[in-house]
Amino acid sequence: MISLVPDDSTEESSTMSAKPASSNAPSTTLDVTILGREFKVACKENERAELVEAVTYLDRQMRDIRDRGKVTGVDRIAVMAALNIAHDLLRERRTKQSVPQDGAIDGESARRRIQAMQGAIDQALAGQENLF
């Protein structure tokens, strides 16, 4: 479990608390930067690499949203990034659930997925025609 460590310099610090690690793994605190803002986060030592990877991924997602210029304000950018990440996670879970455990592929299901992918590709490329 990853938790935000209270920052004594803000009023919010009294409402935030770091939860102790539930297992015997030693806990560590990291200073991370997301979209130019610094945070202290705590995690189990054996989760450190995953936390660093998650921070990098989240920072990249938030920067992409900010750079597109359609969403302003760090709070709104964070919410949009969270929604996009949650959407991707849920879509991935549905995809994994739709694949039979025995590895057999349902032809009709595969055909629908390919058509959906082709539609998404066509839609993404539609705006590119004017570039060439």
Image (tube, rainbow, N blue to C red):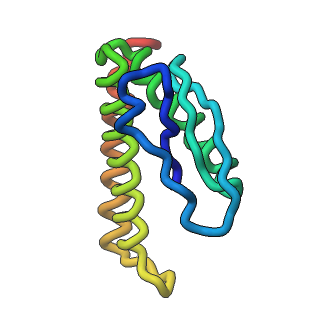
In the image, 122 versus 102, the foreground residue is 102
- x and y, in percent, of residue 115 in the image: 32, 54
- x and y, in percent, of residue 9 in the image: 48, 20
In the image, 3 versus 7, the foreground residue is 7
- x and y, in percent, of residue 38 in the image: 55, 23
Residue drawn at the location 31% of the way across and 32% of the way down: 79
The correct choice, above or below, for 3 with respect to 26 in the image is: above
In the image, 6 versus 34, the foreground residue is 6
The correct choice, above or below, for 105 with respect to 74 in the image is: below
Residue drawn at the location 31% of the way across and 14% of the way down: 72
- From where the camera sits, is residue 121 visible? no
Can you tell which quarter of the image residue 120 is in? Answer: top left
- From where the camera sits, is residue 88 visible? yes
Residue drawn at the location 53% of the way across and 26% of the way down: 34
Q: How many marks?
A: 0
The correct choice, above or below, for 94 with respect to 41 in the image is: below
- x and y, in percent, of residue 44 in the image: 64, 55
- Answer with left or right where residue 24 lies relative to residue 84: right
Can you tell which quarter of the image residue 106 is in? Answer: bottom left
In the image, 14 versus 95, the foreground residue is 14
- Answer with left or right where residue 4 lies relative to residue 82: right
The residue sitting at the bottom extreme is: 102
